[in-house]
Amino acid sequence: MTNPFKNRSLSVSGPATDISPIVPNDGVDLPKVAVSLFVETGGTIAMVTVTGDTRTVTVSDYSILPVGIMRVLATGTTAAGIHAFTVS
């Protein structure tokens, strides 16, 4: 199978090169900065953005949140099935 990403320059404007599940944590950053989040079950997401600001947003089921995120906080997060889109 041919890999269309092999000779492509990586870009935060997409597409992501990987997606991984997130376990919200108040004290640990994500292993890789997320360029966006996918949320299966809507609710509130408390996060720390790449600018270091703490933000809280409410999203619906099957939402994509296109913002750079370093950490998803456990405290204040009620959404579930959260996944990080990353660029490696």
Image (tube, grey):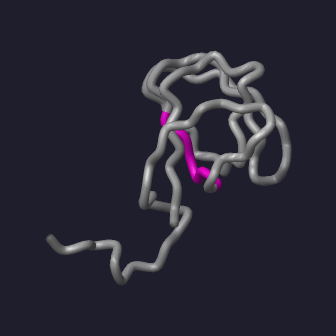
Task: Identify the image quadrant of residue 27.
Answer: top right
At horizontal 77% and vertical 21% (from top left) the residue drawn is 75
Foreground of the two, 18 or 8: 18
Query: Residue at left 57%, top 38%?
Result: 65
Q: Residue at x 69, y 35 (%)?
A: 72
In the image, residue 37 lies in the stretch drawn in magenta: yes
Magenta residues? 33-38
Q: Is 34 above or below relative to 3?
A: above
Left or right of residue 82: residue 54 = right
Q: Quadrant of residue 44?
A: top right
> Would residue 63 appear left or right of 78 to someone viewing this image?
left
Q: Nearer the viewer, residue 38 or 1?
A: 1
Q: How many marks?
A: 0
Up-down: is 9 above or below 49? below
Visible in this render: residue 64? no
Residue found at the very far bottom of the displayed protein = 7
Can you give x and y, in whole percent of width and height, for residue 37 in the image?
54, 40
- Which quadrant, please, contains the N terminus? bottom left
Is residue 57 toward the left or the right of residue 41 in the image? Answer: right
Please name whichever residue, 73 or 36, is drawn nearer the observer in this view of the structure: 73
Q: In the picture shown, does residue 36 fall above or below 45?
A: below
Residue 34, horizontal then vertical, whole percent: 60, 50
- Residue 81 position within the rendered picture, expressed as x and y whole percent measured from the top left: 48, 26
Residue 22 showing in the rendered view: yes
**Residue 58 lies within the magenta run:** no
Tell me residue 53's x, y (percent).
85, 43
Residue furthest toward the left?
1
Q: Residue at x 39, y 79 (%)?
A: 8
